[in-house]
Image: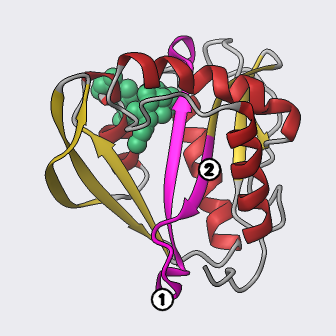
Amino acid sequence: MVPLPSPAAPDAGAAHDAAQDGAGAPRPVVRPATRADLPAVADILEPYVARTAVTFDEDPPTLDAWSTRFADLAARGLPFLVAELDEAVVGYAYASPWRPKAAYRYTVENSIYLAPEAQGRGVGTRLLSALLDACSLAGVRQVVAVVADDPAAAGSLPLHRKLGFEVAGVLRDVGVKHGRSVSTMLLQRTLV
Ligand SMILES: CC(C)(COP(=O)(O)OP(=O)(O)OC[C@H]1O[C@@H](n2cnc3c(N)ncnc32)[C@H](O)[C@@H]1OP(=O)(O)O)[C@@H](O)C(=O)NCCC(=O)NCCS
């Protein structure tokens, strides 16, 4: 993989102050992930691996695997953010290379996962917005989201559409998980 042209400032576009929303509920703080966040990140993903086809992982990534991913993304200048509510990490998002061949170097895939209790409160919107900002600053030109056909991913299509992603196509039955064939929808967002 050829590195992206200008490494992102790790906190670029990602800093948001804690505040209260209009209804008095805490607003998320979105900030760059640190290694210390990785156990919480692993805990957020684990139930999606075990119980859903939102992710095509069949075994939860180990902390070592998370640590390797964290270092790899940092080396590439790609953003890895977390969202906190009441000082607890409740979600994460990162951008990773879309495909390994060199000519794909300006294109990333985004991943975003929230703990169930944090969903439907605007956290995903803030987190993905910050990720897109950070991707722009990193020199990314295209962001691809891969949304599995699974009830647990019901919020993913509306979230991505809200933030300007357009449907690029459907790959039928490309995954098999828990004995079921799973299709994916590809969405694409061009960054300017
Ligand atoms: C997808 C996900 C990140 C969305 O985050 P979120 O904080 O719940 O989303 P928000 O509250 O910011 O809502 C964003 C928009 O999606 C809509 N939405 C959210 N969840 C929804 C659901 N289950 N069904 C329908 N619409 C939904 C919201 O109404 C909102 O649209 P609006 O502003 O026009 O009303 C979160 O639900 C999640 O982690 N899901 C499981 C993992 C997953 O699917 N990750 C994506 C893999 S590609």
53 in relation to 108, above or below: above
Q: Residue 105 magenta-drawn?
A: yes
Q: Residue at x 78, y 75 (%)?
A: 7
Residue 77 locus on image (x, y percent): 75, 68
Mark 2 and mark 1: span between their CA atoms?
Answer: 21 Å
Viewer-proximal residue, 134 or 46? 46
Q: Residue at x 70, y 73 (%)?
A: 138
Neighbours of disc 1 within 10 Å: few (<14), some (14-19), many (20+): few
Quadrant position of ligand 1: top left
Viewer-proximal residue, 191 or 1? 1
Of marks 2 and 1, the one in the foreground = 1
101 in relation to 24, above or below: below
Instruction: Mark yes or no: residue 29 visible.
Output: no
Q: Which residue is mark 1?
A: 103
Magenta range: 93-118
Q: Assess mark 1: CB under 8 A from ligand 1?
A: no
166 in relation to 178, above or below: below
Residue 40 locus on image (x, y percent): 73, 23
Residue 97 locus on image (x, y percent): 54, 67
Amino acid type assigned to the residue bearing label 2 in the image = Tyr
Quadrant of residue 41 in the image?
Answer: top right
Amino acid type assigned to the residue bearing label 1 in the image = Ala
Left/right of residue 86 with respect to residue 62 in the rendered view: right
Left/right of residue 182 with respect to residue 19 in the rendered view: left
Q: Residue 113 magenta-drawn?
A: yes
Quadrant containing the N terminus in the rendered view: bottom right
Q: Which residue is mark 2?
A: 94
Viewer-proximal residue, 93 or 56? 56
Residue 175 is marked as none
Viewer-proximal residue, 121 or 6? 6
Mark 2 or mark 1: which comes first in sequence? 2
